[in-house]
Image (cartoon, rainbow, N blue to C red):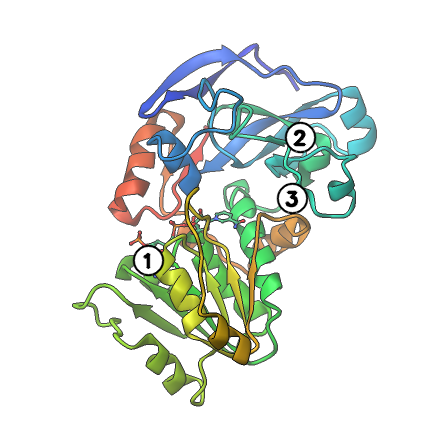
Amino acid sequence: MSVPDTMKAQVFYEPEKMELETKPVPEIGPEEVLVKVHATGICGSDVAYYFGKSSVGTESGKGPLVLGHELSGTIVKMGAVAEEKGGFSIGDPVVVNPVQSDVNSPWTQKGKSNVDLGTVVGVSVDGGFAEYCASHWFWTVPVPKTLDLTLAASTEPLACGLYAVRNLNIEKGQFVTIFGPGPIGIMMVQMAKIYGAGKVCLVGTRDERLNVGKEVGADFVVNTKDTSSPNYVEDLAGFIMDNNGGELADRSIAATSALAAINQSVATAGKSSTIVIFGLPGDDDVHSFPAMECMLNDKTIRYSWLAPDTWPEAVDLIATGKVVVEPVQSFHFGIDNLSESIRKVRDREDNAIKPMMINE
Ligand SMILES: NC(=O)c1ccc[n+]([C@@H]2O[C@H](COP(=O)([O-])OP(=O)(O)OC[C@H]3O[C@@H](n4cnc5c(N)ncnc54)[C@H](OP(=O)(O)O)[C@@H]3O)[C@@H](O)[C@H]2O)c1
């Protein structure tokens, strides 16, 4: 397959300064494959990098850097080791796990690459808001040829959400509350059901997003902010007890970094419950919980970070349609409209949950 020498890429330099440039197609090392990017989704962290709310993961904490870590595409070139070990053929459809930890590190060997981060595509090295992207063969995941590559590009957030749902250890029929109707919270609604939840209650602050959650299977949606909403509930604990046989939630996930939601996720979970904190804290955030109340109710509070071992299952959930991702993919845009689309996500314009860049 012929690969051109140059490509279009969106190069981030500093907050609110990103240029559409023609630059060389990435050189690949022996362990890498070159992926012709089909689709790349905008993540909340791309928005944070773009607006300077968080530093990129380069040594200097600055650009130039091609952002984008939720991508799909096809293999167009392979390094010698990648060809020998990866089992890929040119033209194979793949998704890229951006968290490309050292394959030989003891933590990766133990299946816990999430606690020993190395290179992160689109965060510390060039990523997917371009026409081509390099990826280590080990972290390049094949997808079925029949799978629409635009849908496949949501594998990364889905894989992270799946790890969190697995960490909930849901027992059949349990009442699960999910705080934060972002793209991941909406996908978690579906996964909680697959993992045995009896009823799922999605809690948020704006109806447009909650309605998408309802569309994909939330039994209840609750708006805790907008008093004019038909979904507004003042007493969330009371609402849950009314719908869970007099008990608070059995399982609860905070899929937002909002401290109010994290506190509520613990407060509205009941006896013998498990609470998973998924929303990324700010650098100075401190989580504190009422200890005696947690102790006497035998609550388990745990964190969930990235997706160390959930990629193949995440691909399967999309490919089989068990988790539908179209409703969160908001709208499609071309590479020249990236900055505008990032702004729309920040401003929640056009119900921009997760817009997808599609290369022609
Ligand atoms: N742990 C991990 O491995 C991992 C991986 C990826 C992402 N994350 C984090 O996971 C979170 C979810 O990701 P996402 O992309 O779905 O985020 P998102 O688009 O920011 O969605 C979060 C949603 O939560 C809502 N929210 C704010 N305060 C709330 C409250 N008090 N109660 C209920 N909902 C509230 C927000 O409402 P508004 O629309 O009104 O702002 C927003 O719609 C983010 O914090 C992200 O950084 C964690």
At label 1, the amino acid type is Arg
Residue at the location (54% across, 63% down)?
A: 191
Q: Is residue 1 above or below residue 217?
A: above
Q: Nearer the viewer, mark 3 or mark 1?
A: 3
Residue 163 position in % (x across, y down) = 60, 56
Tag 2 secondary structure? loop
Q: Nearer the viewer, mark 2 or mark 1?
A: 1
Q: Nearer the viewer, mark 2 or mark 3?
A: 3
Identify the residue position indicated by label 1 in the image.
209
> Does mark 1's beta carbon lie closer than 8 Å to ligand 1?
yes
Which class describes the residues within 10 Å of circle 2: few (<14), some (14-19), or many (20+)? some
At label 2, the amino acid type is Gly
Determine the image quadrant of residue 30: top right
Distance, label 2 to label 1, CA atoms, is 36 Å
Figure quadrant of the N terminus: top right
Distance, label 3 to label 1, CA atoms, is 31 Å
Figure quadrant of the C terminus: top left
Residue at the location (59% across, 74% down)?
A: 196
Q: Is residue 347 above or below residue 252?
A: above
Q: Find residue 91 and name its label.
A: 2
Q: Find residue 115 and name its label.
A: 3
Q: Is residue 14 above or below residue 338?
A: above
Distance, label 2 to label 3, CA atoms, is 32 Å
